[in-house]
Image (cartoon, coloured by chain):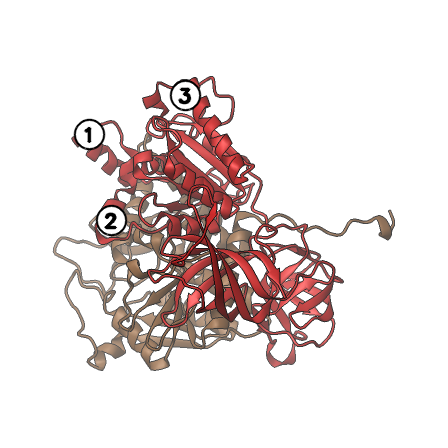
């Protein structure tokens, strides 16, 4: 074989994850180029951990062209906050923490109390205040279209009015991969690079990229109590109702948010491979003709709940 | 269910049809038979079906949409994911009735394949003609026509053959060379995932198998390179070498050593490296997102296009194009708009509205009133910055643009280049 007869290298066909990644990287670069003051919203959850990885793919060896912001309700899992600080420090990027507690202390919102209270709703005020304070014109989020029905129709570049509102009837058509990132003063974009990813895609990507996750995503012994078929953390942030007795169980979290509104599922999956296998098999057992086992219905229940929370 | 990456890669599919054609049932069937539906959702459908005294009604799986319709959201494309053991799919579900042109153009713009629905009792109707015309215009690479409700047509081969013949004739006049018909019953599940025993006369594979077998999405890896520069990466602290030009390959394959030309400046350069976070690549093809390092200092900015020196396009100041007009306000000659092509946004004047196209035949007629919402037309556009655009017929990614009204910031048209002049 001589050099003269060698074929030029051809590029391998893209796998499904490669194609989703190429799309997400393109979205991030397009936003960063067209908007002056974007911010990446980071919760410490798996979806925003994937966003950070995609930002590395888009902008290294340069710095991120935007800061990273966490809206902290004050009721977040300590493991997740520690993970957040560690991860952003590793990346050498700038972290902004917008605090719901600070909004409460400043009298911007009234705190809620009682067994079924959650600061989940209060986050919106803190977020909009932070957007105004830092004059952000675009927020990058990790929402996915498979999370709920209305999201299936939301654009990747989604315009919010001066009040942070989304008008589904006034959405700009989104053609090819040509995005319209224009905003008027006061308006704001929400940009969702992983719109087209599913929960399983996210987990497969976490596995493929070897991404670290907060420990609560893996099975661990935790003191929990049961409410509405969900297992809540036994913690001072979550007030129990009469009759709700804490007990210890092996659980993991499928989503990560505020302690007051995030339930755990029973699981013994302690490794990434075991979690991916469990999620894939949960879907298989969700088919109509088979009786769901306890573990699967726990997860399905959590999925239902999640629709209401977001 | 594949837990490893699906073998055939990602396929984006536009589904077009109305509720009357059984599209909701078809989508419900696709999701159900590929096991994407959670137990609780299915229990709900079972309960409601039983209360109404019907068999399992899979259209109820998209029932959320009925509530949405009252809020006016249904006039919009919905994106859903499903997967089989062999492939990961993204469905762009285009509503059939209202705003169908705008919606189907939007759904078809990103589609590798389109599934069009026909009611076997009615055969080819005006809506079928419009859907096929838009699929042809947007150059969706593969079109599958699901002839649905075969259960209501007695599972009859003759009826299917008649419709398939009509579709073939229509496809030919529109220049669609790949339009395959499949007889199905979305309600009963025949020929969706599994072959139908009741239509044993049909030799082709079921709908999902056909979708699984389509070649992976391709951005024309053999064509000349088109690399619109999105973002210039400047490594922090002087480490890691020089500037990288980041972007998504719109067309072709790029390799180290390739001789390039920067358009519109015309400056030459050679590719020193093709990089991703995971390291240097020997080759990268459309639609990959990569960074390119050049062998010399040249002036390159966002909006420029890196092209193979052999096969570089003309940097055009005038474009002839077919557009789909998407605004309530008429398009009239002289309109001043912004045009976004690749990563370049430039001022544009629609110098002439030459023809309005018939939505079923794509034949042109004079357009004295310009173009109205949901019209298709042929226009002449003059641009302030020269654009290295391809003909849409040669490259979907390098020949497409959008028009933006800079007073409202609305995206007002989808455009496809048919010819360029200096």
Horizontal and vertical percent position of residue B27: 36, 38
Q: Which residue is mark 2?
A: B69
Q: Is residue B261 left or right of residue B322?
A: right
Give the CA distance from mark 1 to mark 2: 24 Å
Q: Chain of mark 3?
A: B
Q: Which chain is brown?
A: A
Give the CA distance from mark 3 to mark 2: 34 Å
Horizontal and vertical percent position of residue B375: 40, 52
Q: Are marks 3 and 1 on the same chain?
A: yes
Q: Which residue is mark 3?
A: B159
Q: Chain of mark 2?
A: B
Please give the name of the residue rendered at 35% of the width and 21% of the height, measured from the top-left corner: B153
- Answer few, some or many: residues within 10 Å of disc 1's Cα (few below 14, many 20 plus, some between 14 and 19): few
User: In terms of sequence position, does the residue under pointer 1 or pointer 2 come before the other?
Assistant: 1
User: In terms of sequence position, does the residue under pointer 3 or pointer 1 come before the other?
Assistant: 1
Mark 3 vs mark 2, foreground winner is: 3
- Contact flag, marks 1 and 2 (Cβ < 8 Å): no
- Contact flag, marks 3 and 2 (Cβ < 8 Å): no
Horizontal and vertical percent position of residue B417: 55, 57
Please give the name of the residue rendered at 86% of the width and 47% of the height, measured from the top-left corner: A1
- Answer few, some or many: residues within 10 Å of disc 2's Cα (few below 14, many 20 plus, some between 14 and 19): few
Q: Which residue is mark 1?
A: B50
Q: Is residue A207 left or right of residue B373?
A: right
User: In terms of sequence position, does the residue under pointer 3 or pointer 2 come before the other?
Assistant: 2
As drawn, B328 above or below A284: below
Residue B135 vs residue B81, the one in the foreground: B135
Please give the name of the residue rendered at 43% of the width and 50% of the height, measured from the top-left corner: B105
Horizontal and vertical percent position of residue A168: 29, 58
């Amino acid at each position: 074989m001589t050099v003269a007869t060698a074929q030029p290298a051809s590029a391998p066909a893209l796998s499904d994850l490669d194609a989703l990644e190429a799309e997400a990287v393109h979205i991030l670069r397009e936003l960063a180029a067209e908007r002056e003051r974007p911010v990446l919203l980071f919760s410490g959850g798996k979806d925003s951990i994937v966003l950070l990885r995609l930002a590395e793919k888009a902008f290294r060896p340069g710095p991120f062209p935007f800061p990273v912001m966490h809206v902290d309700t004050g009721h977040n899992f300590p493991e997740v906050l520690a993970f957040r600080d560690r991860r952003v420090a590793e990346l050498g990027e700038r972290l902004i923490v917008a605090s719901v507690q600070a909004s409460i202390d400043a009298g911007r919102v009234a705190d809620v109390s009682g067994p079924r209270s959650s600061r989940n709703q209060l986050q919106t005020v803190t977020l909009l205040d932070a957007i105004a304070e830092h004059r952000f014109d675009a927020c990058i989020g990790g929402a996915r279209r498979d999370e709920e029905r209305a999201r299936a129709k939301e654009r990747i570049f989604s315009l919010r009015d001066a009040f942070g509102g989304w008008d589904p009837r006034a959405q700009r058509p989104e053609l090819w991969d040509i995005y319209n990132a224009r905003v008027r003063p006061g308006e704001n974009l929400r940009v969702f690079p992983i719109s087209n990813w599913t929960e399983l895609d996210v987990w497969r990507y976490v596995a493929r990229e070897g991404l670290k996750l907060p420990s609560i995503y893996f099975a661990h012994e935790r003191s929990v109590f049961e409410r509405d078929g969900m297992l809540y953390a036994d913690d001072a942030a979550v007030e129990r109702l009469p009759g709700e007795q804490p007990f210890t169980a092996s659980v993991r979290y499928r989503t990560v948010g505020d302690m007051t509104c995030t339930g755990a599922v029973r699981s013994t999956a302690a490794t990434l491979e075991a979690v991916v296998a469990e999620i894939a098999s949960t879907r298989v057992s969700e088919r109509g003709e088979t009786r769901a086992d306890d573990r699967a219905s726990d997860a399905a229940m959590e999925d239902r709940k999640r629709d209401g929370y977001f | 269910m594949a837990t490893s990456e699906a073998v055939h890669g990602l396929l984006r599919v536009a589904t077009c049809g109305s509720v009357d054609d059984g599209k909701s049932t078809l989508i419900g069937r696709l999701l159900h038979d590929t096991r994407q539906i959670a137990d609780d959702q299915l229990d709900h459908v079972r309960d409601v079906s039983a209360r109404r005294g019907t068999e399992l009604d899979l259209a109820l799986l998209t029932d959320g949409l009925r509530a949405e319709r009252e809020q006016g959201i249904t006039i919009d494309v919905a994106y859903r994911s499903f997967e089989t053991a062999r492939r990961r799919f993204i469905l762009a579900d285009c509503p059939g009735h209202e705003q169908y042109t705008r919606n189907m153009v939007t759904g078809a713009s990103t589609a590798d394949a389109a599934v069009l629905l026909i009611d076997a009792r009615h055969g080819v109707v005006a809506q079928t003609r419009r859907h096929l015309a838009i699929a042809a215009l947007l150059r969706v690479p593969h079109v599958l026509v699901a002839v649905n409700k075969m259960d209501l047509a007695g599972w009859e081969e003759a009826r299917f053959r008649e419709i398939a013949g009509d579709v073939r004739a229509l496809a030919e006049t529109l220049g669609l060379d790949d339009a395959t018909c499949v007889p199905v019953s979305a309600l009963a599940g025949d020929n969706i995932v599994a072959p139908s025993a009741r239509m044993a006369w049909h030799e082709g594979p079921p709908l999902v198998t056909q979708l699984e077998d389509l070649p992976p999405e391709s951005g024309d890896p053999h064509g000349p390179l088109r690399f619109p520069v999105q973002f210039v990466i400047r490594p922090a602290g002087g480490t890691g070498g020089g500037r990288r030009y980041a972007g998504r390959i719109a067309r072709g394959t790029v390799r180290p050593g390739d001789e390039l030309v920067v358009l519109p400046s015309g400056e030459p350069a050679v590719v020193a490296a093709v990089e991703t976070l995971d390291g240097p690549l020997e080759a990268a093809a459309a639609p990959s997102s990569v960074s390119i390092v050049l062998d010399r200092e040249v002036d390159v900015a966002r909006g420029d296009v890196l092209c193979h020196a052999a096969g570089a396009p003309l940097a055009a100041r005038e474009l002839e194009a077919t557009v789909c007009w998407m605004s309530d306000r008429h398009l009239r000659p002289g309109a001043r708009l912004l045009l976004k092509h690749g990563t370049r946004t430039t001022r544009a004047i629609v110098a002439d509205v030459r023809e309005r196209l018939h939505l079923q035949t794509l034949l042109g007629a004079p357009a004295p009133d310009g173009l109205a919402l949901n019209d298709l037309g042929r226009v002449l556009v003059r641009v302030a910055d020269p654009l290295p655009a391809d003909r849409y017929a040669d490259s979907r990614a390098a020949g497409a643009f959008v028009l933006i009204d800079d007073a409202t910031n609305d995206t007002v048209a989808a455009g496809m280049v048919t010819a360029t002049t200096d």
